[in-house]
Image (cartoon, grey):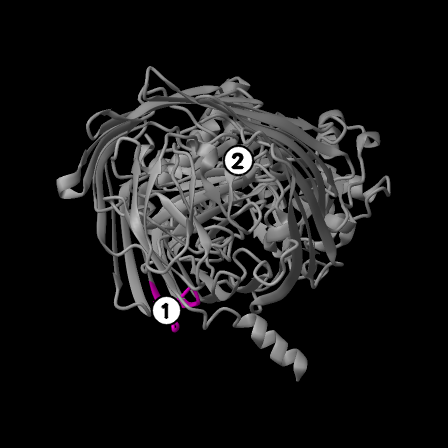
Amino acid sequence: MKAILLFFMLFFCGITFSQTTITGTVVDDNSQPIPGANIIVVGTSTGNVTDFDGNFSLTYNQNPPFSVQASSVGFETVTVEITKRNQKVDFILKEGTSLDEVVISASRTPERIFESPVTVERFGLKEIKNTASADFYDGLENLKGVDVNTNSLTFKSVNTRGFATFANNRFMQLVDGMDNSTPALNFPIGNLVGMTETDVLSVELLPGASSALYGANAFNGILFMRSKNPFDHQGISASVKRGLTSQEASGDNEYTDVSIRAAYKFSNKFAAKVNFGYLKGTDWAAVNEDDKTNIGGTRANIDYDGVNVYGDEVSTNLKNVIESETFLAQLPNPALVNLVPLVDVSRTGYDERDLTNYDASSIKSDWGLYYRPWENDFEISYVGKVGTGSTIYQGTNRYNINNFFQEQHKIEIRNDNFFVRGYVVSDKAGDSYDMVFTGININSAWKDNNTWFGEYTGAFISATLGGADETQAHAAARNVADTGRFLPGSDEFVAAFNRSIADPDLTTGSKFQDASKYYHADANYNFSHLIDFADIQVGGSFREYSLNSSGTIYTDIDGPITYSEYGIYTQIQKNLELNDEMELKLTGSARYDKSEFFDGFVSPRISAALTLNQNHNVRASVQTGFRNPTTQDLFIGLNAGRAILVGSAPSNLDRWTRNYDLSPGGAAIVQSPSVTQTGAAAYNNSYTASSALELAATGNPAVLEIANPDLVKPEQVTSGEVGYRGKFNKITVDVSAYYNSYKDFISQEVVVAPFYGTVGDGGVSIAALANGDSQAYSTYTNSEANVNSYGTSVGVSTKVFGDFDLSGSYTYAKLDFDSEAYPDFATNFNTPEHKFKASFGNTDLFENFGFNIAYRFSDDYYWEATFANGVVPEFHVVDAQINLKVPSMKSIFKAGATNLLGDEYFTAVGTGHIGSMYYVSWTINNL
């Protein structure tokens, strides 16, 4: 009973304290109001921001004395001691630097960026106003060390420090504490169903491993987006943006982006808000016709597999045709098969543009009810979010995500010392479909594969007998086999297309089904108000997944798959004043996480930050992190065309099962025309894909290597980082360097499993490969090789020519992995070695008028992913904007352009080339 009473005393400590209200203004040294300045009670998370005229009001649940701090990007932080209730404070901020901004994410407690023990980037209200990008989320790509890979117009993938694909489950994205990863895909889908720009308060980004505080998914970094609380930000604000996108492949198309926020404080106890966002545009068309399988190949290749051409993934060796009894029975002379070359031939595919309309849209809304029963920092809130939209997603294949729907519901109780929250995230795939299988199954609806390849081979023989050479005979054979093919736009094509996208069976259709969800709860308590010698926090989290794709993604054809994981953590932080000029901040944290499939894992982190002369800060940290295999690593069961993806959870292996017809030679060996193979064969009876290809090229069985990859287990990383932040008059410098060493690196390995025989038997299994009686699988496993990465980032900012802002950053990233020794193992590093970014502008070139120009350079790099591999060429991008503030209308007008030079580029092989965007916007009553 005593323990229970003590718990409730701690939990509700501070609820009944007296209140102190502080009001005032924040202006610069020219007496101009500073909207959006942060006002915070020192040592707490209680705060507010100034309104459009620089005014603020702040209520705190303690009696004086205590200190209040005012800060804003570009100004020095000012701290004032509050000595009486209802005190009025007028802050005058002198011009400072971005290092004076306050962040919360680095240590789960407020601190200046300058003093943070780890690298942290911030994107606040000032940056949102001045970004030359189309919206705040796109503006993140101008931050130091940040990569933004463009999947489509409305789907961007943020990453730091390498190892990125669009399925980026190494990077976490939180919106007001809620993970907005999709349950079906297990990774964030950009801001498609995220925040509206008018509700954004700040964005913070932690590069690198953050597992010690935020759990297994915060492996490469974490993005925090905080919205405006209606107690602090009332009124109606809106933003309307109109413009056009311009791309060589899709032409000029209209673009509209609207966001509205309404918030009202009904009393000191109750406030509410609602947000609405609408976006409509045309996606970047993907028209890459490069041959995936033959570098430099064109559509003239007989075994052509175009990057953005679908249906041509279906391929066979003509040997399989001429061995067919059905085909032989149709020949007047069996000896004619000797005219047929034993080469691979693929079916004729459809361009991606024939299989999608490239509509890009997003409709999202959220609402929040906030209750403060004691009119202080103790708050109970409910937040709901819904979003739907259409976009293009590139994963194993290219998917048209049409009418996708996601919703989130959260209940949270918090004050300055603790929070407890629980939320649920669920999604529905809507009318989404796989464009690759749409092309495949439109072909099949017109003419089955056996008939098409039979007609092709027969026509090849006829053309050869007529005197054609091999090239001419292949051309004639394709013309004959394609006679009557459904042409794009024809009634037959449209009917077959509609049947395919409504059918979730990938043998006949391409519909993408899902209704997965996950439940999450987490809590944190900060004992700093009870313990003086150090800042101590404890917390934990729990998550339960429910996968429900009806067998179209996961092996859940018989019903949902559920599993859970949990974690607990603690952190202690101590500030030591060594002397008048030197202060040391020490931080230690540790987190224990456990998935029901794997042993528990402890992630410790220690860091130190030494501040010298108030202008220089040196930091160092060492931590270990880990990453649990994702839902797809464990439970996927997806036919991707040229390979089948099979997750490696033990219970998953036999849930994937499929019947295969055998070649005549194979049927003779096993005395059956078909066999049944399960996913277990990929892990227990397989050869490496590279050695199987070498066998096909050389005919030498000695080149075969047994694969039999191990089942996947958690990945671990040990990360070390050092950094320096300094102020030199008007120049600020932020430098960091890191080294990551990975153990049990999770990735995919392509293997080939024979339909009969045992790998290494030296006979039957080799015959299976020779007869084409095998299946390629993409397995999920851990690398035996050492995988390391390292890099550095340097950022410099200053004032030039008086009040002009000039900043630049350079980032270096390098992968240390022996790809030649492990040719079947893909790390998906997908990061340029060199990046440079710069910006130049002035927020007040003259009264109420500002501008900004941003430049980005990316070195070329090799992109590898399940859909396509290849080189991404270097690119240079310039964005620019001008803005006019009209205080009498509480409005900001902006005109801007992205990719102003018009040189189209791409960040991943297979996506549409990114063109230019031109826009004008009007923002009302938004700080």
Where the N terminus falls, by quadrant?
bottom right
Q: Is residue 491 left or right of residue 906?
A: left
Name, please, the residue furthest toward the top: 801
Q: Position of residue 549 (x, y in %)?
A: 51, 61
Where the C terminus falls, by quadrant?
top left
Q: Is residue 545 above or below residue 837?
A: below
The foreground one among 646 and 535 is 535
Magenta segment: 368-381
Q: Is residue 373 left or right of residue 333?
A: left
Label drawn at residue 917: none
What residue would you read off at disc 1? 375
Q: Position of residue 269 (x, y in %)?
A: 33, 70
Q: Residue at x 77, y 35 (%)?
A: 785
- State how many labels appear: 2
Label drawn at residue 114: 2
The foreground one among 361 and 807 is 807
SS class, disc 1: loop
Q: Position of residue 821 (x, y in %)?
A: 77, 28
Image quadrant in which you'd find residue 21: bottom left
Q: Residue at x 62, y 76 (%)?
A: 6
Q: Position of residue 888 (x, y in %)?
A: 13, 41
Q: Is residue 541 left or right of residue 913?
A: right
Tag 1: amino acid: Glu
> Is residue 796 visible to the viewer in this orientation of the structure?
yes
Name, please, the residue furthest toward the left: 888
> Is residue 485 visible to the viewer in this orientation of the structure?
no
Image quadrant in which you'd find residue 117: top right
Q: Is residue 369 rendered magenta in the image?
A: yes
Tag 2: amino acid: Phe
Alpha carbon distance from label 2 to label 1: 33 Å
Name, please, the residue furthest toward the front: 83
